[in-house]
Amino acid sequence: MRVMLVDDDLGRMALLRQALAAAGNEVVAQLGPAEDLIAAVARHQPDLILIDVDSPARDTLESLGQISRDRPRPVVVFASHSDSDMARRAMRAGVSAYVVDGMQPTRLKSVIDVAIARFDEHQALRRELADTKTRLADRRDIDRAKGVLMQRRGLSENDAYEQLRKMAMDRNVKLGDAARALLAVAELL
């Protein structure tokens, strides 16, 4: 696994690097907390990001939120102090695991395994939500397009649906896309 490390303590980072290498992982980048995390992720394409800081800064959480949205991947934050508000903000920013009391090399593998499992589950939920939103938008637009056809051509609901379906098949597009195209044209007329 390709891992990116973010830490301001070089000694701690060296220990973490050793523990990761011993488990068969490759450290592709080491950063300080003030460095551009978004650019580093784009450049190195890590499979996992490990951040060991006393307390994640607002800029770090904003960067993690952007990474979670644009280039999602598992992120583990090892924090020195327990802070439930900070843990909530980190989780909202896309952090897969927020571990208090720092990193213990003996627990590293289990923490990474849990973070990856949680990340995979979160990604599956995001895909399901996106699919549901798309289906609802398709249904809404199909109903509106059928209404336009029924009103302008005097068709029954079933005939309007069949005409819309034929249009989608002839253009080799999804029914929802055909409905949106029809609605766009109807708005121009």
Image: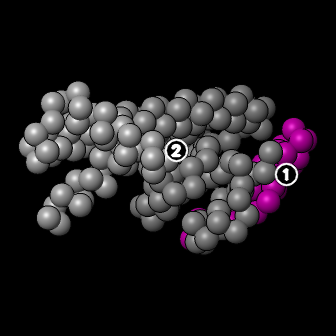
In the image, the segment drawn in magenta is 11-34
**Which of 32/67 is in front?**
67
Q: Residues within 10 Å of mark 2 (few under 14, many from 20)?
A: many
Residue farthest to the front, as pictured: 154
Image coordinates of residue 155 in percent, x first then y, are 15, 36
Left/right of residue 1 with respect to residue 125 in the rendered view? right
Image coordinates of residue 169 in percent, x first then y, are 45, 42
**Which of 163/80 is in front?**
163
Image coordinates of residue 2 in percent, x first then y, are 78, 51
For badge 1, the amino acid type reads: Glu
x 26%, y 39%: residue: 142
Residue picked out by circle 1: 26
Residue picked out by circle 2: 95
For badge 2, the amino acid type reads: Val
x 45%, y 65%: residue: 59
Image coordinates of residue 50 in percent, x first then y, are 66, 49
Left/right of residue 95 with respect to residue 85 in the rendered view? right
